[in-house]
């Protein structure tokens, strides 16, 4: 448990740094949105491009693992999407809630935790999971949000508008460009590598500081909806920390028959707390973000216990 806590402490530290800076007035009322725009337009696209540009087919071709992990994510995403829409939630907001319940923090927590628990054997599965989460699941949520925000109802015109919006979205364009670049088999110049590493390295810390800044804002409107929002956040946290890993275990072990090592890695990756991606989407599209921010915070706190217990059950003494 101590090793898991040590990995999560920097996450809390960065969130608290943003929270404290906003509450003390060091950073202004627009700082959360502006910092988030930096992440969405510069840092995260650099990370997505860099990840895809260096991925190889030999590294990524593990169809059973991909299927188990992907279906596990969708098994958390789609029911929450349907439930929230049935409850009267707008498609864009329901999509943000759905990704908050299914978006594991593979990049910031998955890699160090995997190395502690499984060693270097965890690098390839974690890379695959990161690509699936950051590119595929993220893209699905963006497509649904774009569809929800369009007012056009004629099918072909709606499709053109959505495609146009996606073509201007840096979080969709950057991984596609990364794949295209990887297909050329040309090495990036060292200066370009350094540029991408510097920018991509800022994605996670800036997103966490932005989350802290957002949490520090006093929003009177939350007083009336606080109980309902808190209940939804607890539901999303439960789906993320318990439902998604349970489904992933069943898929990996019973349906696809993965090796015990891959089953354990898939389950741990699915059990990671919610990353900052859903919060970035909510802020970027100016949607309600306090449910998402609470889910990130609650799942990160709760994962100290759930991940530690999971690893102990698996026989990994963290």
Image (cartoon, helix red, strand yellow):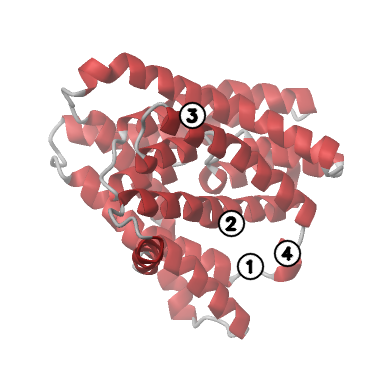
209 sits to left or right of 156: left
Q: How crowded is mark 3: few (under 14 residues within 10 Å), some or many (20 or more)?
A: few
In the image, 65: left or right of 87? right
Question: What distance separates the C-alpha of mark 2 from that of mark 3?
Answer: 27 Å
Q: Tell me, for residue 55, which label it has, or none.
A: 1
Residue 59: assigned label:
4
Q: Tag 3 or tag 2, which sits nearer the N-term? A: 3
Q: Disc 4, disc 1: CB below 8 Å?
A: yes
Residue drawn at x 44%, y 63% is: 172
In the rendered image, residue 49, in percent from the top left (x then y), is placed at 49, 68
What's the distance in space between the residues labelled 4 and 1, CA to CA? 7 Å
Please say if 268 is above or below 87. below
- CA gap, disc 3 and disc 4: 36 Å
For the C terminus, the image quarter is top right
Q: Residue 83 carries which label?
A: 3
- Image quarter in which the N terminus is found: top right
Which of the two discs, 3 and 4, labels the residue nearer the N terminus?
4
């Amino acid at each position: 448990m101590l090793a898991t806590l040590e990995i999560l402490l920097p996450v809390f530290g960065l969130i608290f740094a943003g929270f404290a800076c906003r509450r003390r007035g060091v950073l202004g009322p627009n700082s959360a949105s502006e910092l988030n725009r930096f992440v969405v337009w510069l840092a995260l696209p650099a990370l997505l491009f860099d990840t895809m540009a260096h991925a190889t087919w030999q590294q990524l071709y593990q169809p059973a693992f991909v299927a188990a992990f992907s279906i596990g994510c969708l098994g958390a995403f789609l029911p929450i999407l349907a439930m929230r829409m049935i409850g009267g939630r707008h498609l864009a907001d329901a999509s943000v809630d759905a990704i908050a319940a299914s978006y594991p923090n593979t990049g910031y927590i998955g890699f160090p935790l995997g190395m502690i628990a499984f060693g270097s054997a965890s690098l390839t599965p974690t890379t695959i999971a990161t690509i699936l989460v950051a590119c595929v699941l993220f893209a699905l949520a963006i497509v649904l949000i774009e569809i929800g925000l369009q007012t056009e109802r004629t099918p072909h015109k709606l499709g053109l508008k959505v495609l146009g919006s996606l073509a201007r979205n840096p979080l969709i364009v950057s991984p596609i460009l990364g794949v295209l670049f990887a297909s050329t088999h040309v090495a990036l110049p060292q200066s370009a590598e350094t540029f991408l590493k510097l920018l991509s390295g800022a994605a996670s810390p800036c997103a966490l500081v932005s989350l802290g800044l957002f949490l520090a804002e006093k929003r009177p409107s939350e007083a009336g909806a606080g109980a309902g929002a808190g209940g939804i956040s607890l539901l999303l946290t439960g789906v993320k920390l318990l439902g998604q890993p349970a489904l992933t275990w069943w898929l990996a072990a019973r349906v696809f028959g993965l090796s015990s090592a891959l089953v354990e890695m898939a389950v741990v990756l699915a059990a990671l707390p919610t990353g900052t991606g859903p919060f970035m989407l909510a802020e970027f599209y100016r949607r309600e973000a306090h449910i998402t921010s609470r889910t990130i915070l609650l799942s990160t706190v709760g994962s100290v216990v759930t991940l530690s217990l999971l690893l102990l059950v698996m026989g990994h003494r963290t």
